[in-house]
């Protein structure tokens, strides 16, 4: 029997709405301290990573076509269990070759800056396009890095006040708070660390190393001569990699004073060296306490947010496109729940359909 695309759309919306209600009920159960872990075993090493993506929405109930188009941020979290790897010494005391290969790093910085500017440019990729933020070295490719065992997904258009409880409920259901080693990895967004303080305070906070690399590279290339830019970046990277973040912050602070601060109220161009260096000082200064990378490597914890960034790309492959506009808010929220269930590796989509009440079909009289 043929099923029309419209009917599939309606069914998907119905299922996604039910999943969103179940997710919210789980968050409410956690708030009332009645949510029990559904995983019988206690994981050894866990990480919760969070990032944001974008999708395009339209006003609902306005008839055919796109009305009131708006871009909306999608918050995506990736709670994952990891393989247990740890040691007494740093398993990788020197930056890998991929971090000191000029062409590769330039490409990484260009892609990450492009991804960060998506909200302003409203740039949309083809439906098959993946995540633009490609790391120079996939952690799974390094023998000393922890590998992903099982991941699940949380995604929503909700603000951080509502998204934090959703993340905490998912972590509670997977027994993450009892794990021996726990990490929370994110970029420098303020709301990420607000969620960490509110719901994951005993998880090791780690700022994504790739974002740090971008700030180091752009600051090094904003000042000095062409011949000295790459050596300066390589030196700063080595210092950060070895845990000497205060040295780099001190040098950047001196450069900021040397360049001079802009007059009050003056709007600097994004490429202005004064702005680039000042932003690097602010970013590294605020996150210095989350950049003890040698210790993280020794303890077998991740140093990049590549798990969630690749997950954002997998969401984008379904929800983004030049001609894709999701009804706001219900349609967009529903499709995110179905996509999250599909991308989770714990069989939750199959479990949902197995437990979903069926509807009897009645044979109509001829």
Image: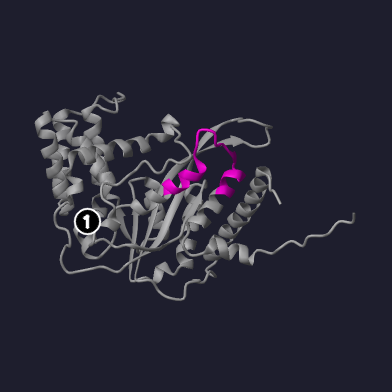
Q: Where is residue 48 in the image (x, y as percent from the top left)?
A: 39, 58
Q: Where is residue 8 in the image (x, y as percent from the top left)?
A: 65, 48
Q: Nearer the viewer, residue 104 or 251?
A: 104
Q: Tell me where residue 301 sits by quadrant.
A: bottom left
Q: Tell me where residue 60 sits by quadrant.
A: top right
Q: Where is residue 89 in the image (x, y as percent from the top left)?
A: 15, 66
Magenta stretch: residue 333 in it? yes
Query: How would you rate the neighbour count of disc 1 (Cα within 10 Å): few for under 14, some for 14-19, many for 20 or more?
Result: many
Residue at figure coordinates x 24%, y 58% from the top left: 142
Q: Where is residue 146 in the image (x, y as percent from the top left)?
A: 29, 63
Q: How many marks?
A: 1
Q: Is residue 344 left or right of residue 84?
A: right
Q: Nearer the viewer, residue 103 or 88?
A: 103
**Residue 281 seen from this side:** no
Q: Name the secondary structure under disc 1.
A: helix
Residue bounds of the magenta highlight:
312-335
Q: In this view, does 359 lie to the left or right of 213?
A: right
Residue at figure coordinates x 65%, y 43% from the top left: 5
**Residue 146 seen from this side:** yes
Quadrant in which the C terminus appears: bottom right
Tell me the residue that label 1 is attached to: 293
Residue furthest front in the image = 1
């Amino acid at each position: 029997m043929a099923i029309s695309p419209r009917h599939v759309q309606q069914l998907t919306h119905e299922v996604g709405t039910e999943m969103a209600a179940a997710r919210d009920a789980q968050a409410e159960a956690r708030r009332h301290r009645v949510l029990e872990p559904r995983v019988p075993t206690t994981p050894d090493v866990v990480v919760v990573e969070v990032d944001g993506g974008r999708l395009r929405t339209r006003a609902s109930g306005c008839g055919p076509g796109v009305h009131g188009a708006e871009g909306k941020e999608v918050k995506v979290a990736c709670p994952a269990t990891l393989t247990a790897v740890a040691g007494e010494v740093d398993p990788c005391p020197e930056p890998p070759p991929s971090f000191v290969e000029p062409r590769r790093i330039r490409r990484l910085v260009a892609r990450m800056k492009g991804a960060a500017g998506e909200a302003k440019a409203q740039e949309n990729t083809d439906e098959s396009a993946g995540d633009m933020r490609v790391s120079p070295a996939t952690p799974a490719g390094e023998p000393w890095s922890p590998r992903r065992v099982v991941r699940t997904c949380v995604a929503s258009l909700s603000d951080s006040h509502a998204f934090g409880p959703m993340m905490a409920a998912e972590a509670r259901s997977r027994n993450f708070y009892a794990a021996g080693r726990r990490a929370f990895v994110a970029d420098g967004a303020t709301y990420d660390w607000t969620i960490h303080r509110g719901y994951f305070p005993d998880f090791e906070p780690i700022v994504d190393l790739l974002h740090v690399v971008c700030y180091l590279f752009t600051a090094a290339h904003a000042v000095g001569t062409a011949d000295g830019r790459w050596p300066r970046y390589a030196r700063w990277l080595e210092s950060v990699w070895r845990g000497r973040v205060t040295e780099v912050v001190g040098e950047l602070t001196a450069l900021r004073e040397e360049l001079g601060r802009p007059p009050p109220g003056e709007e600097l161009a994004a490429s202005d060296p004064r702005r680039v260096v000042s932003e690097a000082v602010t970013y590294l200064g605020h996150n210095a306490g989350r950049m003890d990378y040698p210790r993280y490597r020794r303890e077998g914890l991740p140093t990049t947010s590549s798990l969630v960034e690749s997950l954002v790309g997998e969401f984008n492959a379904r929800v983004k496109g030049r001609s894709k506009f999701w009804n706001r808010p219900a349609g967009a929220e529903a499709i995110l729940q179905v996509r999250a269930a599909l991308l989770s590796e714990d069989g939750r989509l199959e479990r949902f359909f197995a437990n979903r009440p069926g509807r009897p079909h009645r044979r109509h009289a001829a």
